[in-house]
Image (spheres, rainbow, N blue to C red):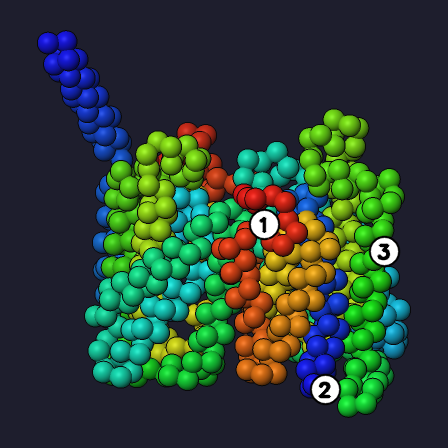
């Protein structure tokens, strides 16, 4: 029983981090129909910013989170204006952006590889290796803190989307772009804002990831399918769906990893992605029957 | 009476249309510079004669490398260019072909050059089965599912002890002298590339190819026009897997080892997409031109800057710039502006 509880707790803590990693992806898809394959590579960029600050002057990764988020959000504005703004009228917009973000992911990987080399890195604040004990069950502090911080950020994001005027505008654009524009929403500005928020979330997730996982520039290929499975299962564009799917899948992956083997725990995500796309392409909380 | 009159006039119309089409085809044949690809092929066939005058192994390697990519990109073009389904998981078939023929070579000593068509068939059957599942979704969902496919097969091959797992398998080297060791693979690869380009030409001008192009324009309309879109798409997937698998077979023996992190790389898939986009998706010459350009650029990056990070960065940048400024690719853009030189008009 304690063993099951243990696996459950570890899975949930990781699931919190994965939820934050996926929420930016989901937001960007919801508002702009951009399947951002570069999202995981930008998370790694955020992790490197945090790593660099930690190595240089011992800044705590969680304190570094807002800085990393701000830097990535600024990069997001720049990238959107340079790469995606001019594509909005293209016929095959969605497919086009998949390829563009794929190219972007390679560029980010190349730049990071050149700057930081391809060795595995991890930031190691004290709490990353400590744990709380409750009876037989232990909770690693690092994963617990990371999970809590990301759930806080996601709650804040949800409140922002639900109650602020900008949040209204973002949700209106998600539901129907043309109608939102007719009602006086500056759709282009909202797109830039949502892209910046999405990348800011990537930067924030990067700071947390930097002490939860070890990372290297090419690691994002493993994450892209993992995050896609979370976002697709949750229903692309639904933040709540992403959170539920992340918690669900990472708990399943934790059980698979313990009982069957560590290699197969990543497989859980890929197989899940495959199955969802075939059985229910719109995901658990999605509305669009077809994302073409 | 009226009915038969109508029938005869209908057949007369069809007859007239056929005559007109044949006239157009004849005119197109006259303007097509068939001599150019044939001369190119002849030059490539004669190229190993250089070995009598010195060591040109590097040149042969480059041509072989470009030919292998030209074959694979042309194969990818059947699905991605004609049918409009972009796959980022085609390195799976590269791996399947390589491992199938490589295992036969390792166990029974039969050269992969002999078994390459068989490897292509195995890849095609796998492609058919996978296509039955993944081609139910389209657009971005299909692209994502193809990445998932690649990830799954990478884990499977990494853990499959029979084929050596992550460490892979070493294949026996042939016992030719150094000067001539590359030549059999060189000819095999040139043959595969030429065959693939010819086959894509035939496919594009068949009823099947027409159906695929209709699917890429508007699948629902194609379906309602009576095209069995599902069968067409799955066949396109299987065919494109066939050519990629065949290339993979010969590539494995040429490298003399099989390893998941050589075959099942997303970078290989990315290169195929890149070549087709840069050269011109859906054209016959596009993937070939793209393959030559990318291989040349790759060599340039590696030779001048050395690091593989620069290579990845460069590939990404070329891809992004090409997508933004020339979405039709080199051949497509030139053809649209009417500036395509006759020697490159292979369609």
- Residue at the (23%, 30%) spot, across then down: B25
Residue A91 placement: quadrant:
top right
Which label belongs to residue B70? none
- Residue at the (70%, 61%) spot, across then down: A244
Q: Nearer the viewer, residue A169 or B260?
A: A169
Q: Earlier in the sequence, mark 2 or mark 1?
A: 2
Which label belongs to residue A156? 3
Residue labelled with disc 2:
A2
Residue B12 placement: quadrant:
top left
The chain containing the residue under callout 3 comes to A
Q: Earlier in the sequence, mark 2 or mark 3?
A: 2
Residue labelled with disc 1:
A282
Are the residues tagged 2 and 3 within 8 Å (C-beta)?
Answer: no
The chain containing the residue under callout 1 comes to A
Are the residues tagged 2 and 1 within 8 Å (C-beta)?
Answer: no
Q: Position of residue B20 (x, y in %)?
A: 21, 22
Q: Secondary structure at mark 1?
A: loop
The quadrant the N terminus of chain B occupies is: top left
Does residue A69 show up? no
Asked if marks 3 and 1 fall on the same chain, the answer is: yes
């Amino acid at each position: 029983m304690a063993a099951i509880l243990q696996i459950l707790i570890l899975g949930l803590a990781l699931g919190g981090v994965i939820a934050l990693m996926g929420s930016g992806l989901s937001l960007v898809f919801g508002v702009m129909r951009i399947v951002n394959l570069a999202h995981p590579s930008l998370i790694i960029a955020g992790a490197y910013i945090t790593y660099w600050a930690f190595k240089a002057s011992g800044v705590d990764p969680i304190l570094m989170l807002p800085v990393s988020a701000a830097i990535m959000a600024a990069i997001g504005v720049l990238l959107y204006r340079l790469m995606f703004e001019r594509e909005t009228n293209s016929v095959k917009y969605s497919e086009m952006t998949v390829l563009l973000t794929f190219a972007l992911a390679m560029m980010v990987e190349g730049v990071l590889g050149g700057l930081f080399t391809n060795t595995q890195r991890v930031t190691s604040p004290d709490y990353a290796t400590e744990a709380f004990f409750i009876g037989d069950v232990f909770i690693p502090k690092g994963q617990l803190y990371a999970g809590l911080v990301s759930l806080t950020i996601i709650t804040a994001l949800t409140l922002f989307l639900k109650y602020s005027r900008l949040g209204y505008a973002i949700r209106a654009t998600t539901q129907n772009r043309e109608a939102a524009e007719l009602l006086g929403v500056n759709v282009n500005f909202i797109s830039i804002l949502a892209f910046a928020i999405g990348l800011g979330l990537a930067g924030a997730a990067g700071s947390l990831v930097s002490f939860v996982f070890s990372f290297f520039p090419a690691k994002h290929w493993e994450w892209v399918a993992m995050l896609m499975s979370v976002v697709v299962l949750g229903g692309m564009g639904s933040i709540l769906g992403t959170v539920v799917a992340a918690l669900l899948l990472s708990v399943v992956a934790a059980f698979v990893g313990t009982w069957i083997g560590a290699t197969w725990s990543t497989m859980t995500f890929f197989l899940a992605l495959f199955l969802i796309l075939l059985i229910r392409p719109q995901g658990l909380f999605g509305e669009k029957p077809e994302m073409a | 009476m009226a009915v038969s009159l109508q029938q005869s006039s209908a057949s007369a119309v069809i007859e007239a249309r056929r005559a007109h089409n044949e006239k157009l085809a004849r005119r197109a044949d006259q303007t097509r510079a068939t001599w150019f690809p044939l001369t190119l092929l002849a030059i490539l066939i004669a190229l190993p004669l250089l070995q009598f005058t010195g060591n040109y192994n590097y040149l042969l390697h480059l041509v072989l490398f470009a030919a292998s990519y030209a074959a694979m990109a042309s194969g990818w073009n059947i699905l991605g260019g004609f049918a409009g389904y972009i796959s980022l998981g085609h390195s799976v078939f590269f791996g399947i072909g390589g491992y199938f023929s490589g295992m036969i070579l390792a166990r029974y000593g039969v050269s992969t050059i002999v078994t390459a068509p068989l490897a292509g068939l195995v890849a095609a059957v796998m492609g058919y089965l996978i296509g039955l599942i993944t081609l139910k979704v389209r657009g971005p969902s299909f692209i994502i599912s193809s990445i998932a496919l690649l990830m799954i097969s990478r884990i499977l091959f990494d853990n499959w002890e029979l084929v050596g797992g992550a460490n892979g398998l070493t294949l026996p080297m042939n016992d030719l002298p150094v000067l001539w060791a590359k030549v059999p693979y060189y000819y095999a690869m040139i043959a595969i590339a030429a065959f693939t380009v010819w086959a894509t030409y035939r496919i594009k001008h068949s009823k099947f190819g027409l159906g695929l192009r209709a699917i890429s324009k508007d699948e629902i309309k194609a379906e309602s026009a009576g095209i069995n879109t599902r069968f067409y798409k799955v066949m396109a997937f299987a065919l494109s897997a066939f050519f990629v698998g065949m290339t993979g077979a010969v590539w494995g023996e040429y490298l003399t080892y099989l390893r998941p992190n050589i075959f099942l790389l997303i970078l290989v898939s990315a290169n195929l997409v890149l070549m087709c986009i840069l050269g011109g998706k859906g054209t016959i010459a596009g993937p070939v031109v793209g393959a030559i350009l990318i291989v040349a650029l790759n060599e340039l990056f590696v030779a001048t800057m050395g690091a593989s990070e620069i290579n990845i960065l460069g590939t990404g940048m070329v891809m992004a710039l090409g997508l933004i400024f020339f979405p039709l690719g080199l051949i497509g853009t030139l053809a649209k502006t009417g500036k395509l030189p006759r020697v490159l008009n292979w369609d």
